[in-house]
Amino acid sequence: MRVIPRVLRRVQTVAQDAVGWRTVAAAKVGMKRIMNVARQKGAQAADALKTAYRDLVQLTETVVAQARQTVNAVTTAADDAAQRIARRLEARLPPVEQVIGQTTRRVLQGQAVPVPEQVVSLFEPHTAIRRKRKPGKPVAFGCLIWLNEVDGGIITRYQVLDGNLDEVAQVVLRVDAHIQSFGYPPALVTGDRGLQSAANERDLAQRKILQVVLPKPGKKSAKRIAHERQDWFVADRNWHAGIEGRISGLKRRHKPHRCRYHGDAGMQRRVGLGLLAHNLRVIARATA
């Protein structure tokens, strides 16, 4: 509701019925109404929330219809600049229509919309929904970055994962990539508790990895508690805490959590440049 009227104002000389700021102001009022009602509970609040969403959807549909009329009018115009703006506007309309469809299905009809069919960004449609599965943590939007780090703080491999993939299934794949790069398995594999599974520990043991430090989440048996209290397990788990600190340092120093480029290639480039700078910094400190 901000993007489309902004583009329409630039082609007002071609289409005189472009949407003005009154429509944008009405959309802002509708959004504030949805946020206020969403904080309430009860059946009455649920009905009020549907009504607010329905009004906003109808308003957005009106704007999209007017934008379609503008695109048709500009297509027949001779002004090349106006046609370029119209093509930009036409590229924005399909994701907006998809947002209208998913909102209608999810909120008004009560249907579950699969994550791959959801659009959460008009400018970066590949953005995925990341649920941290932690109480009180909001839903994040972006891409999951997987890092392979070796002793000394050097990041040997990274990958920007596509979509909302299961992190547990990535452990063995990344260890195999490490073995392929270096020709032999690492002596230690460590990760946070979200990566632990019996299958992962079994597969890593088959690859002749001596120490696997993946703390088990939730309730533990007495045998598991004794296993995780061994001196080597505790020491390696404490060593893993330094990796978490480096990830925090990466975010502060090289800003991989905020991509300034566009598209999947831009995300890969942003992350890669930041990690390259990190490795150069680690090598410089070690050799200084």
Image (cartoon, rainbow, N blue to C red):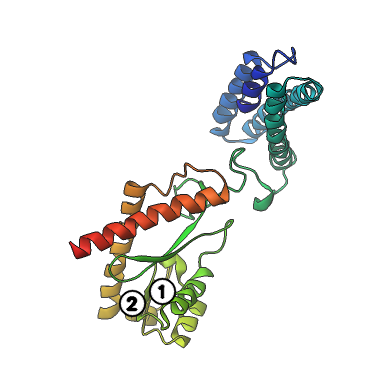
| Residue at horizontal 55 percent and vertical 51 percent from the top | 265
| Residue at horizontal 65 percent and vertical 17 percent from the top | 9
Q: Amino acid at mark 2?
A: Glu
| Residue at horizontal 74 percent and vertical 39 percent from the top | 101
Q: Residue 256 location in percent, x, y?
A: 42, 49
Q: Quadrant of the N terminus?
A: top right
Question: Which label number is shown at residue 220?
Answer: 1
Res 56 visible: no
Residues tagged 1 and 2 counted as in contact (Cβ below 8 A): yes
N-terminal of the two: label 1 or label 2? Answer: 1
Residue 57, above or below 247 = above
| Residue at horizontal 58 percent and vertical 43 percent from the top | 124
Residue linked to disc 2:
228
Closer to viewer: mark 1 or mark 2 = 2
Residue 286, above or below 70 = below
Q: Helix, strand or loop at disc 1?
A: loop
Q: Residue 50 location in percent, x, y?
A: 68, 32
Q: Residue 71 location in percent, x, y?
A: 76, 25
Question: Which label number is shown at residue 172?
Answer: none
Total marks shown come to 2
Q: Amino acid at mark 1?
A: Lys
Residue 71, above or below 167 = above
Q: Quadrant of the C terminus?
A: bottom left
Q: Helix, strand or loop at disc 2?
A: helix
Crowd tier of the residue under label 2, counting other residues whose Cα lies within 10 Å: few below 14, some 14–19, many 20 or above? some
Q: Residue furthest left?
A: 288
Taking depth in this image into account, of 47 and 19 the one nearest to the observer is 19
Q: Residue 210 location in percent, x, y?
A: 36, 85
Taking depth in this image into account, of 145 and 193 the one nearest to the observer is 145
Which of the 4 image quadrants contains residue 121?
top right
Q: Relative to residue 64, is residue 180 drawn left or right?
A: left
Crowd tier of the residue under label 1, counting other residues whose Cα lies within 10 Å: few below 14, some 14–19, many 20 or above? few
